[in-house]
Every structure is written in structure tokens, then in C-alpha cells.
Amino acid sequence: MRHETRRNVRQNHLALAQKILSVALERGLVPGDHLPEQIFSEACGVSRTPIRSAFKILEEKDILQWRQEEGYFLALGSTDEIGAVIRALEDAENSVAHRILSDRAERRITDVQSVSALTRRYKVPRTSVLNALKILSKDGIVRQLPGRAWAFQPLVDSPAALEDSFDFRLIMEPQAITAPEFALDSKRAGLVREHMNAALGAGDGRLTPTIFRRIDIEFHILIAECSGNRFLRGTLAAHHRLRKASQKSAAIPDFRLKQAMLEHLEILDSLERNQFQLAADQITVHLRRSRIRKPRAANRGIPPLAKGPNRGART
Amino acid sequence: MMRAPEIAFFPEASFGAALNCVGIAQELQRQGANPVFICHAGFTGVFAEYGFKEYHLPEHPGSSAEAIADYWQEFINTHLPHFDLSPLEQLPTYVGPTWRAIVETAIAAEGDLAGLLAQIRPDAIVLDNVIMFPAIANAGCPWVRIVSCAETEISGVGVPPYLSGLAPGDDTGAFNTAYAAATRDVHRHYNAFRKRHGLTALPPGTFLESSPDLNLLLAPQAVRYERAEPLNAACFVFLEGCVRRESDYELPRFAVDGGPLVYVGFGSLGAVDTALIKRMLLVFQTIPARFLVNVGGLIEAYDVVPDNVHLASWFPQPSVIEQASLVIHHGGNNSFCEALYHGVPSLVMPYCWDGHDNAQRAQDVGVGRRINRAGWTDASLRVAIMDLLEDAPMRRHLADVARDMQSYPGTSRAAREILQLLD
């Protein structure tokens, strides 16, 4: 049990280390730049103690450099280098649950699995697989079937699933805002705003689809969790967790990434002014723009097969 | 204050044309012009995502999403077997019916297109298509033709016939005769349409004239044909491809480590052949490389994906190819030029239209290899991939090609030429 707790703490610090690097990337930090504990504590919304532990992990991996009486400094610089480190950290964090989820999201394993098959695939003890499945079942990603098999629930991992996700969100997200007693968590909102501004201000090419996706989910979970309706709150937050679990960073042109981020900021402005109906309308526009998807098939002389965009534009 | 020149792009409803135009429009915008897009229903939002204003041709009754889906199902059922045929055999089965569809699309779009052009009042129109729309010729401003399928679109001595997949010097008699027969009726129909709108008739087999102002050919030096009579340099400009800027591509995590990266994309039409792609995945599984495979909208058709394969519905292709060691594609000019621009060899598996010409050319000039859709075996595909991955002389040649192309980016040359038209 104690071992399990220590492992969890380490996992949290690894996750925080990833977040610190994402923030450094968003803010366009270059090698030699100082990382003040206080600033990162505010940016990540945690106290300075865990920040220090996460800095320590990054130092062990030669990503940060410790200077006596000065603090921590960035040792790596390019987006590619930092991106690679973030991925490596994810691998370090790579619990069996994470690997199972990742393989399912990539369709490398089918939607019904036995513990034995997973044990063989990952070459880990049976108990590790069972623990992993328990973790995933808490988020509603798998469920145990009668007998020994486990079934994955649908992920947001195909154009059709994405369409359904947008349909669902178009109904629920404006409602989450207009339901009575929406209460914006202003501290979290301030943090999300800061992340968005930093990402927008970081310069061309710095706002990558992965960074966008992280901030996007953070923003939409904030809206869900501030809703006054307990059921909307739970259902929407669970859906955003599923989106996060699906692990797909869509290839979106830079222009749209920035435009979508600005739309988030406008929605936050309206929420902070208690203009809930306006914010609900803005989130509808935002979701409609975001759902526009490329035609499924297009060729000369033949009408494009384009269920998403047309439906989005007309409804 | 002078207003920025307004350039109206009208690409055909295919991604190749659409994305070429995005590349040129991005550059025009940088050079101070205001590019806008006229687009077919169904391409809604594709250009807006890059920050360009869109004007939409309206959908016509009977073109609901469901009707189009049915049409596509019918199209696939009818034409999938035709893609295994030779270019000559495709003339009556695929090329003739496709020209018929293209002509009918042009006739249906004419009134709406004229209306949109009257609304936009552009300073110039850029047409990336294979057919002329009278509304463009009659718009009262210069128009630019983008030749984006293959150089063979502009005929000449030394250039094989368009869509033939033949090499220079091959006997063209049988192909030319069959092409004339396959297009005779639809061409007559098209000329009658032109006449109704005040345009002169075009010679048999030709559906689009050269622009009197400017024609941009997306044919890099490395793959150009030797023409007995050079084209008039005053209005024909060759471009070193037309590669657009895309957001960076972050590689996904594979369940295996290392190995060269191979990008596989057959265009949105090619993606409908899921059976063929599934067969290929089984071969990829045996190769020590990582494969990124564009499966269009049909990702749900795939159950078990090998550990060294990542599937997605859309890739920012230029950013992906930049990181790849090999591109397997259908011979679309865009994919071909992007591979050349980044010095990456092509394994071309054409299924129709200009893909045949580009596949032949890739093999002829030593920048890739052709493999037929029909008749490949697991072993022959594997050998073709491994050979290209290990072909050091080809890679050195391609490095030179890439350096040349990147020194003269087609997008900025195109933008400059278009703006000069307005001086």
C-alpha cells in the first residue's frame, strides 16, 4: 500500500513535470532562461513544494540545470527537444493502463480483451493488468463483461465518433452555461486564461496541436464543472475525460488553432461579466466552427462526400 | 487609399487543387493581396481554417448529404474494379464517364458562379481545374490557369498524351484513337454549352483552353518533359511545385521503436479502397519501419492495426513528408511534388487519371518507382519498399532536387506572377 502511494506521488510529479515543460514551451522560454518557482506554482495551480519535486525530476533528466542560490534554468531549447522530453516523460509515466489505452486509441487491440491476452502483450504480471483495467474502468473507459472479458467503451477516435461528440456538446455545453447558478471558478479561470494568453503569445509554430488540445480540454472541463446543474456537470466532465483519453491531436491549421483560442478567451470574458446567454451563444459558434471537418472523399467531377461540414453549416 | 487586389481562387472539388491554391493564396496574402475562395458545397470550411474568406456555390436540390452518400456508394461499387485496369482500358470505363460528370458539374455551376463573380468583382481569377467555366472567361478580368494534374495537360511534341501513362517515344496511336472515341459525345455536348455562353469551340478532346494571360504549370524541373517546341514564356510559367505551409506535425507514439518513417496516402478517393489498404497493412507489419497511413474518413473499417502503423483521417501532409524517408501515394501531383520538395522517394500506385502519368514519370526520371494496383504480391510490395528505402543514389539525386525546389519556391513565384498581371 505504502509502495502504491509512493508510486502515485511519483506519477503526480511526473505529470507536473510535463505540465511545467508545456508551460515553458507555451511561453517561448529558451535555454538559459530562469524558471522561478513562484511563477510556475501559479501557472500550474499547485504549491511550491510539488513544483520543487518536479523541477528535481527535470534536473535528473538534464532538462533543467540547478545553480546554487539562483534556482533552476532551462537546459534544452527547441520545440522538438522539449516535445521529445514531454513524450519521454509520458513513457516514464507509462503505466500499463496508459499503454492499454494508447493501443486501443490506435486500434492496435480490439474492443474486447481478456486479461490473459493483455498479460501476454505487455509482458507484465496478471495483477498489473487487473490494476490497469480497474483504473480505466473508474473513468468508464472499459467495463467487465460477464465472465473474464473486458470491453472498451467507444472512444472519440473516428470522424463519425467526433461528429457524435460535437452533436452532444452542442446540446450540452450551452445548457451547462445557461442552467441556473452557473458559478465561474475565478481562480481556475484566471489560470486557464493565463495558459491561453501564453500559448497565443509564444510565437509562430509554438502553439502545437498537442498544447492546444491540453488547454482546450482544460477550458471545456472548467465550463462543465462550473455548471449549476449537477447532472450536466458530471456528464460533460466525463465526456471531456473520454476526449482526453482518446489521445488524438487533430491536424488543425495554425490559423484555426489561434482563432479557436481567441474564441475561448471571448467566452471567458462573457462568463466573467456574467453574460451567460452571450457566452452560451459564443460556445455554440465556437463548437460549430470547430466541428467543420474535411470531406470524406473528393474527386474531380464528383460531389464531395461531406456529411460534417454541410450538416454543421445548415443546422 | 488603394484597396488590396482581390484574387478569387476557384479550385475544383479535389484536395490536390484546393491545397495548391491554399499555398499560393498564403503567399499572395503575404505579398499584400486579398485572396478569397469560391468553393463547391462540401468544401465549406476547408479554406476558412486557413484564414481565407469563402464564397459557396449553393447546393442544388437532390444533392443532400444522403443523396451524395448514395452517389458515392454507387460510384465505388461501379468504379473500384476499374481502378485495376490499364490507362487504355480505363478510357471507356472511367475516363469517359468522369468527363461526362465534369461537364455536367460545369454546366450546373455556371449560373451560380457568374452570380458569385459579379458579387466578388475580383481583380483576377485563378482557376485550378480541368474544364473551362464560361463565367470566368466572361468575368471581365484576367484569369490564370493552374495546370496541377501533370505537365501532360498541355500537349506538345515530346509530351505523351494526357492520362495515358505512356513515356515519351512510346506509340500513342491506340491511346489517341480510344481517347477520341471515349470523349467524342461529351465533348460535343460541352462545345454546345460553350457556344451558348459565347465561347468558341475547343478542338476534340480538349475541355480547357490555355489562358491568354498566365498559365502556371506545377511541374518541377526534375520531372519536366523535353518539348520539341518550348511553350511561350510570356504566358507559360513553370513552378517548382506549390508546397503550402502547414502546422508542425508531432509524430504519434508507435508501439515499436525506431525505423524509417513511411507516409502512405492515396487521396480521399483512394482511401475508399479499404480492402487494398488492409492488405498493405499486413505487408507493412513485416517491414522494420514506421508507417503513417491516411485512411480518410474510413478509420472505423480497421480492426487490428499493426504496432508499427498509425492511422489517421487527415495529415498535414507537407509537414509529415518532411520527416519521412518514403512516400507511397497514388500519383496525385500534390503528393508527388511534396515528396520531391522534401527529397523523398515516391512509390506510386496509380489508380486513375493523372496518377498514371506521374507514376510513369517518377520511374523514368529516377525519383521513385511505379507499382501496379493489380497484380502486386506481398513479396513484390515489400521488395519495392525496401529497395526504395535503401536506394542511396536515388536519395542523393533527390537531395539535389529538393535543394533546387526549395531555392525557388513555386508559391512565391506564382504569387509574384499573378500580381504582375495586375500592374
Image: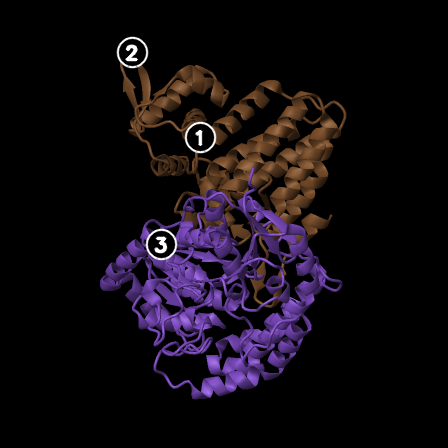
Chain colours: A brown, B purple
Q: Chain of mark 2?
A: A
Tell me which numbered mark, 1 or 2, is placed earlier along the sequence: 2
In the image, residue B213 lies at what x, y percent? 49, 62
Residue A229 visible in image: no
Amino acid at pointer 3: Ala
Asked whether A297 or A92 is in front, the reply is A297
In the image, residue A90 lies at what x, y percent? 41, 36
Look at the numbered disc 1 and give the secondary structure of its residue. Answer: loop
B292 vs B289, left or right, is right
> Which residue is situated farthest in the top direction here?
A69
- For the image, the number of numbered tags is 3
Amino acid at pointer 2: Glu
Report which residue position mark 3 lands on. B324
B398 vs A168, left or right, is left
Q: Chain of mark 3?
A: B
Q: In which image quadrant can residue B197 be found?
A: bottom right
Mark 1: few/some/many CA within 10 Å (<14, 14-19, 20+): some
Report which residue position mark 1 lands on. A202
Mark 2: few/some/many CA within 10 Å (<14, 14-19, 20+): few
Circles 2, 3 touching at the beta carbon (< 8 Å): no
Look at the numbered disc 2 and give the secondary structure of its residue. Answer: loop
State the mark number for residue A132: none
Report which residue position mark 2 lands on. A69
B418 in relation to A91, above or below? below
Question: Which residue is pictured at 71% across the width and 32% down the height?
Answer: A280
Residue B17 visible in image: yes
**C-alpha gap between disc 3 and disc 1:** 27 Å
Question: Which residue is pictured at 48% across the width and 18% down the height?
Answer: A42
